[in-house]
Image (cartoon, rainbow, N blue to C red):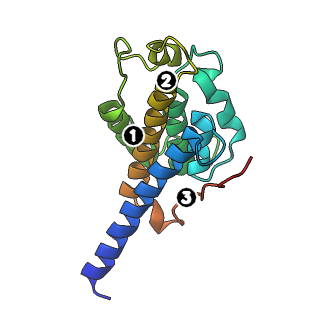
Amino acid sequence: MTVDERDAAKDERVRAFIAAARLEAHTLYDGVATPQRSCGIALAETFGRRTAPYQALRRGGLTGCGECGAIVAGRLLIGEFFGDPDPTGAVTPALMDAMQAFEAKWRARISRGAAAGDSIVCNVLTGQFPVFKSPERHRFCTDLATEVATCVAEVLAERDVFAREEPPVAPVPRGAS
């Protein structure tokens, strides 16, 4: 295999990984093909991480008063992949670089819909929907979680996570309850 062929194969793997992460997060949050997950859990599962701590991100820290759980989950995932495993270690240059890239990506691409200002507080984002359990709010949050997963996947791919481990997207447990 030539260098060009290897590069093309890697590019295809990266595109497939990003597309798989996008589809996985959408499927898990949307809840049509599989039982619906909260935004944080959908992101954790998408990237093969333990879900328990991400449950606290549901509805902006359970109260709606905190930042969007999908965005916070994205930050935590970046930390899991690029942070120093030593609890007393300094912030690694890789973590700082990855976090800056993630922040730039979601800020450029996340739609706040009719929500006022730049706030990403859950109650502000979802307050534009008179009924929280409405299909419109669910679609809005599904799109937001899907886009955050795409941003995380792009950051991982751009920093060649694949050179260290298998792509972390876990398969959707179809029909699981």
Q: Earlier in the sequence, mark 3 or mark 1?
A: 1
Q: Residue 13 at x, y = what percent?
A: 40, 68
Category of crowding for the residue at label 2, using alpha-carbon neighbours closer than 10 angstroms: few (below 14), some (14–19), many (at least 20): some
The residue nearer to you, when weighing 151 against 159, is 151
Q: Residue 56 at x, y = what percent?
A: 67, 28
Residue found at x 52% / y 33%? 70
Does any portion of residue 84 appear in the rendered image? no
Q: Which residue is mark 3?
A: 168
Q: Is residue 1 above or below residue 149?
A: below
Q: Secondary structure at mark 3?
A: loop
Q: Secondary structure at mark 2?
A: helix
Category of crowding for the residue at label 3, using alpha-carbon neighbours closer than 10 angstroms: few (below 14), some (14–19), many (at least 20): some
- Marks 3 and 1 close (CB-CB < 8 Å): no
Mark 3 vs mark 1, CA separation in Å? 17 Å
Residue found at x 32% / y 67%? 11
Q: Secondary structure at mark 1?
A: helix
Give the quarter of the figure containing the N terminus.
bottom left
Q: Is residue 97 above or below residue 103?
A: below
The residue nearer to you, when weighing 57 against 102, is 57
The residue nearer to you, when weighing 85 against 73, is 73
Residue found at x 52% / y 19%? 122
Mark 1 vs mark 2, CA separation in Å? 24 Å
Asked where in the image residue 77 lies, by quadrant, the reply is top right
Closer to the eye: label 3 or 2: 2
Q: Residue 103 at x, y = what percent?
A: 38, 34
Q: Which residue is mark 1?
A: 102
Category of crowding for the residue at label 1, using alpha-carbon neighbours closer than 10 angstroms: few (below 14), some (14–19), many (at least 20): many
Mark 3 vs mark 2, CA separation in Å? 29 Å
Q: Residue 156 at x, y = what percent?
A: 43, 53
Q: Which residue is mark 2?
A: 137
Q: Earlier in the sequence, mark 1 or mark 2?
A: 1
Closer to the eye: label 1 or 2: 2
